[in-house]
Image (spheres, rainbow, N blue to C red):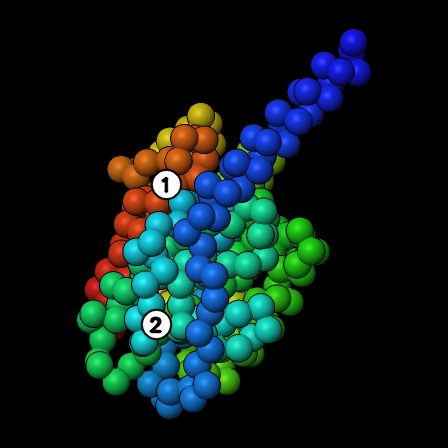
Amino acid sequence: MKSSCFAVILLVIIACHHKAIVERTTNFPKQAKQVMTPPSKQNVWVFILAGQSNMAGRGLVEPGDTVVDQRILTINRAGQLILAKEPLHWYEPERTGLDCGFSFGKTMIKKISGDNYILLIPTAIGGSSISQWIGDSLYRGVKLLSNFHEKAAIAKQYGTIKGILWHQGESDANERDIPHYKERLGELFRQFRLIAGNNDLPILLGELGSFSKDQEHFSLINKAIHDYSSNDKNTAVITTGDLKDRGDSLHFNSNGQRMMGQRFAEAYLHKFN
């Protein structure tokens, strides 16, 4: 009797898991269009997306998120140039969803010269701490800083790295790591800029969401982000206090991701363009 009940429960769990996967991936694009003739390198503005899950994307992809723009590009797992569609990140296929990158690209492309292109390079890995980035840890099958280095090298083949979008800190929102977060941001960004070959490279930072159940620690991470940025003239911080979660008190919902992308673009255009 017990074994029969267990079997029924297991089947229900499997069915629910399958349903969740289907719902999450329903609007994922079925194919990618490779760009066979890359645009002139001098016309390609490259932005690298880095951090943890809220940069990797956990929002629900909707049909509009997969409508391509010929001037917004990304790369596939093989490093080939393709037209950008959500989801941009491929590292965590069982988790990934809508991120802020495509929204950022769509906002940017409206404001820059019609001769220019936006190339979005995904490097974010959910759950990664800043010390793991600094230490080039192997996390969820990816060596974090080595992967960033590799993707930056690919980016330089196609264009000029214009900036980095950074959203991370949930994994560091604890009593042990908060006191060191500001200092670690400085060390990691020094390495990012060294890899990019530009000591003045703009870096845009996003606040952690205001919807966390651990508001005290998340607020302290946000304070460290602002404190760091106030001493680094080549950074800007976007606010997220009004954005909503997807129901898990941790990840931004789809509208929140799109709004973050717009705010990253507006911050970049206001301060660095």
In the picture provided, is 187 more to the left or to the right than 142?
left
Which of marks 1 and 2 precedes in the sequence? 2
- Looking at the rendered structure, the number of numbered marks drawn on it comes to 2
Where does residue 34 sit, x and y in percent of width and height?
46, 77
Q: Is disc 2 surrounded by few (<14), some (14 to 19) or many (20+) residues within 10 Å?
A: many
Q: CA distance from mark 2 to mark 1?
A: 23 Å
Residue at the spot 48% in from the left edge and 48% down from the top edge: 25
Rendered position, 103 above or below 150:
above
The image quadrant where one finds the C terminus is bottom left
Rendered position, 128 above or below 210:
below
Q: Which mark is residue 72?
A: 2
Quick check: can you spot residue 230? no
Where does residue 166 sit, x and y in percent of width and height?
44, 56
Rendered position, 267 above or below 245:
below
Which residue is at the front of the view, 165 or 222?
165
Disc 2 is placed on an element classified as strand
Specify the amino acid type for callout 2: Ile
Residue at the spot 76% in from the left edge and 16% down from the top edge: 4
Specify the amino acid type for callout 1: Asn
Q: Quadrant of residue 200?
A: bottom left
Residue at the spot 30% in from the left edge and 71% down from the top edge: 69
Rendered position, 216 above or below 189:
above
Residue at the spot 56% in from the left edge and 30% down from the top edge: 16
Where does residue 264 sit, x and y in percent of width and height?
31, 58
Disc 1 is placed on an element classified as loop
Quick check: can you spot residue 160? yes
Which residue is at the front of the view, 212 or 40?
40
Circles 2 and 1 in contact, beta carbons < 8 Å: no
Q: Is disc 1 surrounded by few (<14), some (14 to 19) or many (20+) residues within 10 Å?
A: many
Judging by the rendered image, the residue that carries numbered circle 1 is 253
